[in-house]
């Protein structure tokens, strides 16, 4: 294994080296004698094993042992600036070409243990139950195909309407009147035949049907908003299936997304019980008696639906590849479109008497 420095900026200062590994993160390393910057230059080539590093350093005037190099490489890997050189070679040439930008994205999270090729393989092996082929769902479908997910079961009951063309870019004029799942499957086959898309023309109504649809899935994405208690149904089904789910939507002018990992994060039922304890109802779209109901208006334009699909797919990707921990597990994320794109994140807690979380406790 040949460690290689990621293509990051390295700033040399007197007696110090600064590694700029992330946009907002710098690592400062003491470098009195210049050996650190020399090692970084050697590592940037990615052509030597740890055992070969002492000789390379000796050529450059530094006497170091293999143990020194092993410790230094371990420390650099710890701060996330090393890759395993040549790890992409484990993928065939066509996959490397098709997924080049995906692999370079994964580089952000790769290290000597887990490579970008490993993350890609995890995505390619994944099986997603995608509920909904509308504004958010069709966007999630497109992004998951771009990432090269292995299999998607796409469930929807609607047909394509003219108004969908404002934001559902998997459909065209010729699709108007067709079932969305069929049109989406055909689009997917043209775009990226590497992903198996199964079209299920069905209306989601209960936990049992969700459990049936989700058999064998590694993740559920909920991109539907009916029936009214759909999030609770999906929540319960995901406990049965033992897989996480991600969801999102638009309330008035606010995008939101969150996820649940059964047995690990607080669940949607916990949130419900917490709110009941606090005498609170749903924020924004309230369940209490209102003089004038807000009505179901869909304000999701193309960019809004794409933003939402992007946030949801990124979170789905964290579960499928485990590049980094899910950011929305038991955390309500919002982005306010009509107020300067203000973002908030509100974690909720596990409810002590949640019947679903209770079942998995200590398991
Ligand atoms: Zn719970």
Image: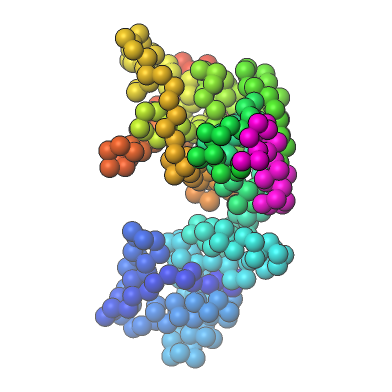
Task: Look at 39% across and 79% down and name the residue there.
Answer: 37
Comparing 325 with 99, the one in front is 99
Residue 113 visible in the displayed image: no
- Mark yes or no: residue 233 visible: yes
* Residue 47: % across, % down: 58, 79
Q: Which residues are magenta?
A: 173-196
Could you tell me which residue is drawn at 61 percent across and 41 percent down? 173
Question: Residue 12's quadrant in the figure?
Answer: bottom left
Relative to 277, 65 lies left or right: right
Give the quadrant of residue 236. top right
> Looking at the image, which residue is at 55% across and 61% down?
101
Q: Is residue 189 found inside the magenta-colored segment of the image?
A: yes
Q: Main secondary structure of the magenta part?
A: helix
Colour convention: rainbow
* Quadrant placement of the N terminus: bottom right
Image vertical order of residue 279 relative to residue 24, above or below: above
Residue 97 position within the rendered picture, expressed as x and y whole percent measured from the top left? 65, 65
Q: Is residue 362 above or below residue 33?
A: above
The residue closer to the viewer here, 113 or 194, is 194
Q: Quadrant of the C terminus?
A: top right
Q: Nearer the viewer, residue 61 or 339?
A: 339
Q: Is 336 or 76 nearer to us in this picture?
A: 336
Give the side of residue 38 with respect to residue 90, left or right. left
Is residue 52 magenta-colored? Answer: no
Q: Position of residue 270 (x, y in %)?
A: 45, 21
Residue 349 appears at what percent x and percent y? 40, 26
Q: Residue at x 68, y 61 (%)?
A: 95
């Amino acid at each position: 294994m040949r460690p290689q420095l990621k293509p990051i900026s390295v700033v040399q200062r007197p007696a110090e080296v600064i590694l700029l590994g992330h946009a907002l993160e710098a690592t400062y390393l003491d470098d009195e004698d210049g050996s650190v910057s020399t090692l970084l230059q050697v590592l940037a080539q990615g052509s030597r094993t740890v055992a070969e590093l002492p000789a390379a350093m000796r050529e450059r005037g530094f006497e170091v042992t293999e143990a020194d190099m092993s410790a230094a490489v371990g420390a650099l890997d710890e701060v996330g600036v090393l890759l395993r050189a040549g790890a992409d070679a484990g993928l065939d040439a066509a996959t490397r070409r098709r997924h080049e930008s995906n692999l370079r994205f994964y580089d952000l999270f790769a290290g000597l243990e887990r490579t970008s090729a490993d993350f890609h393989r995890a995505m390619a092996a994944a099986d997603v139950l995608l509920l909904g082929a509308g504004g958010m769902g069709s966007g999630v479908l497109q992004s998951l195909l771009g990432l090269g997910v292995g299999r998607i079961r796409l469930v929807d009951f609607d047909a394509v309407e003219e108004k969908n063309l404002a934001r559902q870019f998997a459909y065209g004029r010729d699709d108007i009147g067709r079932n969305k799942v069929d049109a989406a499957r055909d689009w997917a086959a043209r775009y990226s035949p590497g992903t198996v898309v199964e079209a299920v023309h069905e209306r989601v109504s209960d936990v049992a049907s969700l459990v049936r649809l989700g058999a064998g899935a590694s993740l559920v994405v909920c991109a539907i908003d009916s029936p009214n208690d759909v999030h609770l149904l999906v929540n319960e089904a995901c406990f049965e299936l033992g897989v996480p789910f991600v969801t999102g939507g638009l309330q008035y002018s606010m995008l939101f997304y969150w996820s649940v990992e059964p047995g690990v994060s607080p669940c949607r039922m916990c949130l419900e019980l917490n709110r009941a304890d606090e005498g609170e109802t749903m924020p924004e779209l309230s369940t209490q008696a209102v003089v004038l109901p807000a009505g179901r208006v869909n304000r999701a334009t193309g960019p809004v639906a794409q933003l939402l699909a992007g946030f949801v797919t990124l979170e789905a990707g964290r579960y499928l590849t485990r590049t980094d921990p899910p950011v929305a597990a038991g955390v309500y994320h919002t982005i306010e479109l009509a107020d300067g794109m203000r973002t908030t994140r509100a974690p909720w807690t596990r409810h002590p008497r949640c019947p679903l979380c209770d079942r998995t406790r200590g398991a």
